Image: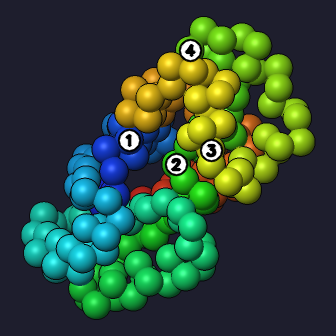
Amino acid sequence: MTTLVFLLEEPSAKALLQGLVPRLLGENVDARYLVFEGKQDLEAQLTRKLRGWGVPNSRFVVMRDQDASGCHDVKDKLSGLVAQSGKGALVRIACRELEAWVVGDLAAVARAFAEPAVASISNKEKYRDPDALHNPVEELRRLVPHYQKIDGARRLGRLLDPQTNASTSFRAFCEGLVRHTASR
């Protein structure tokens, strides 16, 4: 069995992936989640954590929000840190932030929060490219006033649909993850 190790900047990413990963990869993967205390902590410890990982048949996935940085700059920096470890990893960036992935599937948001009206606005222009939203979490809180990051991620990880999600970075994450685990 393959051990898939996720190195994540925040607890909400873990909550979302715990619902998503089993649906994408099935039960033949032992998923483990290393959650850091933000992006600076992730970057400071990434090389050391990868070097020190000793579980055989492990694959690594590094995921971080883009935030205000350039997407390619963030990915290049993380890829450099991975290379310093001597190990390989799939590096994926949530553009602009993880909540853009959630905004990319407003039908799932509507189901998760029993807010049917939310699904009907998914075709509005501003929701067609959720990765371009300046502040996706605030947009979610406008649509679902009681939205909380970890609770929302936990509810939505098991509902987000990679086939219909409008977030390009979410689809790239899902496709990359499937390829990364199948390429052994």
Give the mark nearest the N terminus, 2 or 3: 2
Neighbour tally class for label 2: few under 14, some 14-19, many 20 plus, Cα within 10 Å: many
Marks 3 and 1, Cα distance to the nearest angstrom?
14 Å
Q: Tag 3: residue type?
A: Pro
Marks 3 and 4, Cα distance to the nearest angstrom?
17 Å
User: Regarding mark 3 in the picture, which secondary structure is present there?
Assistant: helix
Neighbour tally class for label 1: few under 14, some 14-19, many 20 plus, Cα within 10 Å: many
Q: Residue at x 82, y 20 (%)?
A: 120
Q: Tag 4: residue type?
A: Phe
Residue under numbered circle 1: 12
Neighbour tally class for label 4: few under 14, some 14-19, many 20 plus, Cα within 10 Å: some
Give the mark nearest the N terminus, 1 or 4: 1
* Residue 125 x, y percent position in the rendering: 89, 42
Classify 40 as above or below 76.
above
Do callouts 3 and 1 mark residues in contact (Cβ within 8 Å)? no
Q: Is residue 103 visible?
A: yes
Residue 144 image-quadrant placement: top right
Q: Tag 2: residue type?
A: Leu
Give the mark nearest the N terminus, 2 or 4: 2
Q: Is residue 167 left or right of residue 114?
A: right
Residue 31 versus residue 40: which sits nearer the camera? 40
Marks 2 and 4, Cα distance to the nearest angstrom?
18 Å
